[in-house]
Amino acid sequence: MKKKLSIRDIAKQLDISITTVSFIMNGKAKEKRISDELTNKVLKLVEEVNYKPNQIAQSLRTGKSKIIGLMVEDISNPFFASVARLIEGNAYERGYKILYCSTEGKADKARELISMFKDWQIDGSIITPTEGIEEEIQSLINEDRPVVLFDRYMPAIDASYVVIDNYDSTYKGVTHLIEQGYKNIGFVTLDSSMSQMIDRRMGYEGALAEHGLTPCIKKISFDKSNEKIIMQIASFLKKNKELDAVFFSTNYFAIRGLEAINRLGLTIPTDLGVVAFDDHDTFQLYNPSITAIAQPIEEISKQVIQIMLDGLDGTSTDTAKKQFVLPTNLIVRKSSVPKK
Amino acid sequence: MKKKLSIRDIAKQLDISITTVSFIMNGKAKEKRISDELTNKVLKLVEEVNYKPNQIAQSLRTGKSKIIGLMVEDISNPFFASVARLIEGNAYERGYKILYCSTEGKADKARELISMFKDWQIDGSIITPTEGIEEEIQSLINEDRPVVLFDRYMPAIDASYVVIDNYDSTYKGVTHLIEQGYKNIGFVTLDSSMSQMIDRRMGYEGALAEHGLTPCIKKISFDKSNEKIIMQIASFLKKNKELDAVFFSTNYFAIRGLEAINRLGLTIPTDLGVVAFDDHDTFQLYNPSITAIAQPIEEISKQVIQIMLDGLDGTSTDTAKKQFVLPTNLIVRKSSVPKK
DNA sequence: ACAAGATGCTAAACGGTTTTAATAAAAGAC
DNA sequence: GTCTTTTATTAAAACCGTTTAGCATCTTGT
């Protein structure tokens, strides 16, 4: 194959200096007072031979990679996949590429990935942190490149973030169940001390407390297989026969939960009311349709990318961290409305 | 912040040459006859100050980026997201990062992305091609870095690929419907001339022809919104009242299709039998559960990554393209079994 | 006629690594 | 005691751009 041509080749071919070519390529022709005549000649040749500057050399020199790191818990989760898709689209428009990775909720994987982000001189990072990586996140922020957390934040760290109002959303969802007459409301959640899960649990407890009801919580760890999750939820429901409703704190628990409910032969919403956190295709279609708390995916993505781009611009010198807490939307469907 | 330290700093600190440090860092100490004493001294300092070679400089010099480009149709589609997740996990284990992007089925976006892959000297590419980018794919292959297509291949191009047996899978799915007594089977598919869609349609037509039935096909273009897809499927079903079953050629059409069927008040499987290509959480859970053709996601990912890593190794000089056609699994559920 | 400023362009340093070819010193051969 | 090898290390080129500082040459003002 013909070897890539470099800026040197262009310069040699026109018998001018490399510098001149570089200036022209970077739109500094005017600023550097290169004559229009020469500028056009260079541009024409560049076009003709389809010369493109070597991105890597460029990165090496400038320290900018034009890459944004996107670290999510699990890219195969529809919520993260959707956000990823929207962020990607936006980033590409501005000439940024996305380097993505999944933490699988594991701190050591997250640590490794952050270290990789640094090695690779990523221009900015968008991260859903795992537990216990405060130190690494802080050191990433210290590198002076934009860092945006989303889905959850870290109380101990002053970083930009975009999250939803987990407490209030859950509070409303649970209150809705209570208003529909449910009295014994279970709560199935991820065993995690991250902000989003804590807030959801507190929203649940807050709503119950206000009506003098007692909580009943099942925590499940992240790395369980689908089948194991179904089993755990089923046995939780079997053990707590007094429950007349369940709130699932994530969409994948809700989906496994529906399977568990099926297997136990329970009927929604009469035997058991159901509300899920985070909407999903399945919920709309399921019979009965499942009440869910929908996250504003477009809005989240928009804010995340906005903060990122503002940070990358470098024009705004204000180092103030931007923090957004977005509202969610409780979509009431049949699974939480027992009497018609 | 303390600026990154370079190989120069290490060399200077020990008053030895950069070269020596480089050799030691790259495990060539023995080969280059560097004394054990010096080797250990360097390794110790490197450890102490936590020196890491600058990846970008390394890439510039070696021409290797340790990055694999992953270009899928739509990362928010669970099928692609799952494959992406598995590929990612595998790649990271081998020290490769994933640069991902979605084509959204658009040729010009795909072209742009391929050009970016080249600019960035991606070590290898994993691609679900769109229509009309044969030329670009070929030129990417010509760059002499591994390229693996998946989900679909391009007949005109000699490339490695991993696909499933679309013809046979569809044939079996449709035959199953016929065996269950359905006579007028509709086919809702993506309006695309890519191999996977063509093969699915031919499988459908083949099965019908064998039983003397007449096809009835609805093609939908990729860039429609969810709501529009639902409307189109609904009107297709309304116009063709004689249909007693539908085969959906993708999971997202099936999901929209179920919504359409709901709205029309039709009952599955008595009014209408349903089979979907590509399984989905929803199908197992839906009532009635939906018969689906499950793709072997793990197997696909495994083969893709295997071909990629073999190619990256550089040890195997055989340039023969590896081509896999994997079988699928028809999961019969209630939606296609009218009489019990 | 001469200093000051504008014009159009370039040499050279830089970024951090890998790799080729070379060198000084020590060891071995005869 | 000279000649060749081996050993342990290194200088310098290469990768491919960006950027700083500067150099001729030509205008302009007085």
Image (spheres, coloured by chain):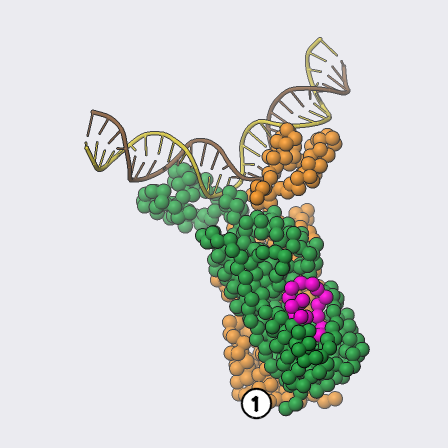
Chain colours: A green, B orange, C brown, D yellow
Magenta stretch in the rendered image? A187-202
Q: Residues within 10 Å of mark 1 (few under 14, many from 20)?
A: few
Residue B153 vertical placement versus A319 (above, below): below
Q: Is there any visible trace of residue B267 in the rendered image?
A: yes
Chain letter behind tag 1: B
Q: Is residue A231 part of the magenta span, yes or no?
A: no
**Residue at the image point whose x is 54% and y is 88% from the top:** B238
The x, y position of residue A16, in whole percent, is: 39, 38
Taking the image as shown, residue B195 lies to the left or right of residue A268, namely left
Residue A129, x across and y down, in percent: 64, 59
**Picture coordinates of residue B267, whole percent (x, y):** 64, 88
> In the drawing, does residue A322 fall left or right of residue C30?
left
B53 is higher (above) or lower (below) than A87: above
Task: Specify whether residue A100 is in view.
Answer: no
- Residue at point 71%, 37% (across, down): B44
Taking the image as shown, residue C8 lies to the left or right of residue A49, namely left
Left or right of B231, for residue A13:
left
Residue B253 placement (x, y as % from top left): 58, 76
Is residue A194 part of the magenta span, yes or no?
A: yes
SS for tag 1? loop
Closer to the camera in the image, B203 or A112: A112
What amino acid is labelled 1 in the image?
A: Lys
Q: Quadrant of the N terminus of chain B?
A: top right
Residue occupying the point 72% across, 83% down: A244
Which residue appears farthest toward the bottom when viewing the image? A340
Q: Quadrant of the C terminus of chain B?
A: bottom right
Viewer-nearest residue: A44 or A319? A319
Q: Quadrant of residue B69?
A: bottom right
**Residue that numbered label 1 is attached to:** B241
Residue drawn at x 42%, y 47% is: A26
